[in-house]
Amino acid sequence: AKVLDASASVRTKEVTVKAENKVDDDEDIPIAQRMKKTVSSSIKSSSTNQKVTKVVSSVKKTIKKSKKPEKDSKYSKSSKQLPSGDGQKKWTTLVHNGVIFPPPYKPHGVKILYNNKLVGLTPEQEEVATMFAVMTDTDYFHKQKFRENFWNDWQKLLGKNHVIQKLDLCDFGPIYEWHLKEKEKKKQMSTEEKKALKEEKLKQEDKYMWAIVDGVKEKVGNFRVEPPGLFRGRGEHPKMGKLKKRIHPSDITINIGKDAPIPECPIPGESWKEVKHDNTVTWLAFWNDPINPKEFKYVFLAASSSLKGQSDKEKYQKARMLKDYIKNIRAAYTKNFTSKDVTKRQIAVATYLIDKLALRAGNEKDDDEADTVGCCTLKVGNVECIPPNKLKFDFLGKDSIQYVNTVEVELPVFKAIGQFQSGKSKSDDLFDQLDTSKLNAHLKELMPGLTAKVFRTYNASVTLDEMLHRETKNGDVAEKIVVYQQANKEVAIICNHQRTVSKTHGEQMRRLTGKIEELKDTLKELKTDLDRAKKGKPPLKDAEGKRKRNLSPEALERKIGQTNAKIEKMERDMQTKEDLKTVALGTSKINYLDPRITVAWCKRHEVPIEKIFNKSLLAKFAWAMDVDPEFRF
């Protein structure tokens, strides 16, 4: 086994790394971002000084007014970490009501066709068949792996002697038709009926929405247990189509204060797996993931809670602290690019790649998990050496998202990668002397608390800070927002945060093009009317043959200016929409960008913070709202 204990880390003290007060600007910028120095030539510039005004005055009001639940994950969050704390006390008293389970399955009694004959199913068999049937109009329904995994799990419920022996002879059409009718019934419900259902649901969930931590009422972020279903995964996940079984109270460990009443088990006759009183952790409940049992599903407090806010702040402070160490850390790993010790050399090169390309460290996978890798788990075939000093990376990263990037690297790094590949097959480990725990143990020697993921947060935040500082010019709010979005886009590209192009993207672009064409036609008419008005002639009739208002030249010039401004805005929006169609901006904004950078920038440039952060992010980052306008990461 390649997994090594952290204590088995390389015992090297080659360079004592100390914090530096100053770092060269260029040293802070990742390779991927150095390649692009400008955002857009269309951004107007001006030398006029701007006043710093308080643009976040309405933040508290906005948060208070919002009645919608925060956009935390609807269900529990998944993590590979064991449910243990860092030994530090997080709370003194903790009271909550546990979790809410999905309702039991209600059979509909619709039969399926097998070999053109109707076949009845037990409620348990029918429930899983319905999960498959409702996916008829999705790509998953036709994917071989999805169908294969579904059949394997469904067949266990059917039993060996069941009449259904082949999935391809099954016709789920009757259940799908029932499903469409049910959907239509919901659409036809009156506003009052929908409102009554919503209120009933909120009434049932209300007691689970809150926890009391050290006497303070805090919102719980994800108190719902996910209902059973078919696993989809990202990309070509090897487990797609497998049955996510129903979670029972006996699967769930509750964490609560010693003197607090234990949450009542909501399902009669069942009981919790275990009840803990661990004040060194912030989770309220956890259970093993039904698809990947080595992973855990957690229930946490909401993003706006004080515990979450403190945790976020500490994360970004640690990344900001790295700025004071980064120069000497880079000097340390650069020195070891040519070390005779292979392990030292691999640590140095891996740290370089994590630093400069914001790669994830990577964890070893089981055979039945998605074939995704990070830096430490790269295979020889994932990296191609292109002389004289370019590396082409091609691998599946987190969530099975493909990472493809060709970059210039330091010549010693190029040579070292070639040496690591020598004599190995494409499926062999590139860094065969290294794993994540070994790398992190080494990094902690360079800076207190430093791990590979801190580089990612640092690189993302420093890139945003540098680009906003360099690219923001005087102009209107819309132009400044474009600058922010372009900087956010650069970070998303560095972090490889991708999304599929929306199915409605083409239609949205066509609609915008149509509106722009209409405005241009209006502009032509206005210019004609202006020309006639200046000559004392009345305006021409409109398309319907009606006489238009006889406006003065000044009024017509004003309308021309307004129409031009609308066209410019729409063209800018259209370009931005096209630029960002495959980039997911939200992930980096939520997890990797220090919110103080954004808030300070908004204050300096008089951009309303609500234009950048939605209501849930305003609540999540409430701790950052009082930052000084001159804050720099």
Image (tube, rainbow, N blue to C red):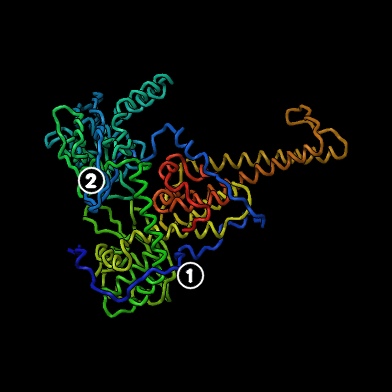
Q: Nearer the viewer, residue 381 or 456?
A: 456
User: Which residue is label 1 attached to?
Assistant: 24
Q: Nearer the viewer, residue 199 or 585?
A: 199
Tell me residue 152's x, y (percent).
19, 42
User: Which residue is label 2 attached to?
Assistant: 279
* Sooner in the amino-acid sequence: mark 1 or mark 2: 1
Q: Is residue 357 above or below residue 54?
A: below
Name the amino acid, label 2.
Answer: Asn
Tell me residue 458's x, y (percent).
41, 60
SS of the residue under disc 2: loop
Name the amino acid, label 1.
Answer: Asp
Rate crowding at label 2 as few (under 14), some (14 to 19) or many (20 or more) other CA atoms within 10 Å: many
Specify whether residue 431 is in view: yes
- Residue at x 24% of width, y 56% of height: 365
Q: Nearer the viewer, residue 522 or 590?
A: 590
Residue 552 falls in image quadrant = top right
Residue 428 as seen in the image, left or right of residue 513: left
Q: Is residue 31 above or below residue 520?
A: below
- Residue at x 23% of width, y 23% of height: 109
Marks 1 and 2: which is nearer the front?
2
Residue 160 as seen in the image, left or right of residue 476: left
Rate crowding at label 1 as few (under 14), some (14 to 19) or many (20 or more) other CA atoms within 10 Å: few
